[in-house]
Every structure is written in structure tokens, then in C-alpha cells.
């Protein structure tokens, strides 16, 4: 039995992943941005061990969330699922890019890390000089892939991978989305607990390795990105 923490698990892919993990007999801790969303999360996954509350657009709340996760003990996997789409750039950066970076730095290392990216990352960029104000959705999904790649390179003891769940019919994706929702969920669940999911530094779509932007493999860019995030957050990623 594995123990998994999932950000943004009040609804959508995060909630569905939690439900699938619980059905397989695993322990799951959920996350929601406020009390109302936490109540929704508990209703959808009543078997969850706990629900932690934090607004990921608030850096101090993110730091506190990391403390609360560590107080609960060791997790076998963390799934960074939380994200916003149609929002101001500052909020997109804070939730989609900065929060997973800070949580990765501060949460005690799990055995596996899963970062939810998107095929839209291929049109993304990293504006190091103006990252907080010039990060749109596609940019944030490239940045989270950069983070996954950097973590895989720096932490040999951790399996760190990124997932494109596809354009799926969630609240974010909309009812017209054309990809398979179940396959989008299955990939992150498999990476979190699957006995045969033993790779690292990879980018997956529907449980298969997929092509991705070559920018993500640029080690100089990875290091510049980590240095930039350290400057913004005041937190440095552990190197061992």
C-alpha cells in the first residue's frame, strides 16, 4: 500500500486520481484551496486520510502546506496536479509554477514525484527576467516540465516524471474536450504506484513516453530556471 499526496484534488483529474488510488487500497491525502472546496473533496473521496487546505497563489500558505504535509509523515508519492488556466499571468505563475517548485523544495522527499504538464508546453517559453508577470498557461507547463527534468537529474533516489493528461473534459478542459478522461487519470496513478513505472525524467501521454519541447532538456536553462525560482521564493532546491 502506498501513501500519496495530491494537490488540487477537490475535483477534476486530481479527485479522479484520488478515487482510483483509494479503490486500489492506497492511502491518499487531498488538497483544496479553501474550506468549501475541502468539503467537496471529502464528499467525493470520503475514504481519504485527510484534506489539507491552502491557497497556492499565496506563497506563505504554500510554505505552511509543506509543513503540514511533513507533519503527516512520509509519502511514497506526490502528484502536483493543481493548476489554473484562464487567470492573470501572476496567478498562473504562482499556482502552476511557483507552488510546485516550493513544495518540491520543502516537502520531505517522496519516492516518486509526478508533475502534471500539458501538450501546450510546446509553445511555451521561460522569461527569466520577467517570470512572475510574463508566464502564461503554456509557459507554466513548460516550466513544470523543466522542474521535473531538473529534479530527475539532481535527485537520483527519486522517480520524477511529467504527464500530459491530454485535452480532457474537466472543468478546465471543457465539455468539448476530445481526449479520454480515464487515460489521463490512469497515467498519473500508474506513475504514483505502478510496480513497472520505474523511469525518471520522462514525459508521458496515456502511459507512453511522448515527444516534448527540447528546451526541457537544456541543462543550462534548467539551472537558470532553478536560480530564478530561488530568487523569487527565497528557497533553494536541495541538491542531494
Image (cartoon, rainbow, N blue to C red):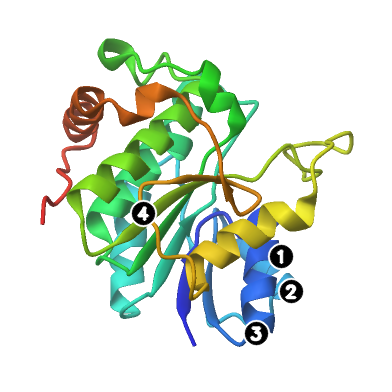
Alpha carbon separation for disc pair 4 and 3: 30 Å
**Is the residue marked by circle 4 packed among few (<14), some (14-19), or many (20+) residues within 10 Å?**
many
In this picture, residue 152 sits left or right of residue 115: left
Eye-nearest disc, 3 or 1:
3
The residue drawn where x is 36% and y is 60% is: 65
Circle 1 — which element?
helix
Name above or below for residue 198 compared with residue 96: below
Left or right of 69 on screen, residue 183: right
182 over 52 or under it: above or below:
above
Task: Locate residue 46: give its quadrant.
Answer: bottom right
Name the residue carrying label 4: 200
Marks 1 and 2: in contact by CB < 8 Å? yes
Q: Which mark is residue 47?
A: 3
Residue behind mark 1: 40
Give me the residue at 18% from left, 35% from top: 230
N-terminal of the two: label 4 or label 3? 3
Task: Please tell me whether mark 4 sits on a helix, a strand or a loop.
Answer: loop
Residue 43, numbered label: 2
Amino acid at each position: 500500500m502506498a501513501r500519496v499526496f495530491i494537490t488540487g484534488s477537490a475535483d477534476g483529474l486530481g479527485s479522479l486520481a484520488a478515487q482510483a488510488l483509494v479503490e486500489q487500497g492506497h492511502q491518499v491525502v487531498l488538497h483544496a484551496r479553501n474550506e468549501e472546496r475541502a468539503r467537496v473533496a471529502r464528499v467525493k473521496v470520503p475514504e481519504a486520510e485527510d484534506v489539507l487546505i491552502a491557497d497556492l497563489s499565496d506563497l506563505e500558505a504554500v510554505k505552511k502546506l509543506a509543513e503540514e504535509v511533513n507533519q503527516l509523515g512520509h509519502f511514497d508519492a506526490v502528484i502536483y496536479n493543481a493548476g489554473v488556466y484562464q487567470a492573470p499571468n501572476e496567478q498562473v505563475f504562482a499556482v502552476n509554477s511557483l507552488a510546485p517548485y516550493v513544495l518540491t523544495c520543502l516537502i520531505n522527499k517522496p519516492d516518486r514525484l509526478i508533475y502534471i504538464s500539458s501538450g501546450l508546453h510546446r509553445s511555451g517559453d521561460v522569461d527569466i527576467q520577467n517570470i512572475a508577470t510574463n508566464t502564461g498557461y503554456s509557459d507554466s507547463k513548460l516550466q513544470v516540465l523543466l522542474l521535473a527534468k531538473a529534479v530527475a537529474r539532481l535527485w537520483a533516489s527519486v522517480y520524477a516524471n511529467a504527464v500530459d493528461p491530454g485535452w480532457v473534459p474537466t472543468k478546465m478542459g471543457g465539455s468539448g474536450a476530445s481526449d479520454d478522461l480515464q487515460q489521463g487519470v490512469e497515467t498519473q496513478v500508474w506513475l504514483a504506484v505502478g510496480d513497472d513505472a520505474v523511469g525518471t525524467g520522462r514525459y508521458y501521454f496515456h502511459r507512453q513516453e511522448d515527444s516534448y519541447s527540447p528546451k526541457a532538456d537544456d541543462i543550462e536553462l534548467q539551472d537558470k530556471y532553478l536560480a530564478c525560482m530561488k530568487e523569487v521564493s527565497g528557497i533553494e532546491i536541495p541538491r542531494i
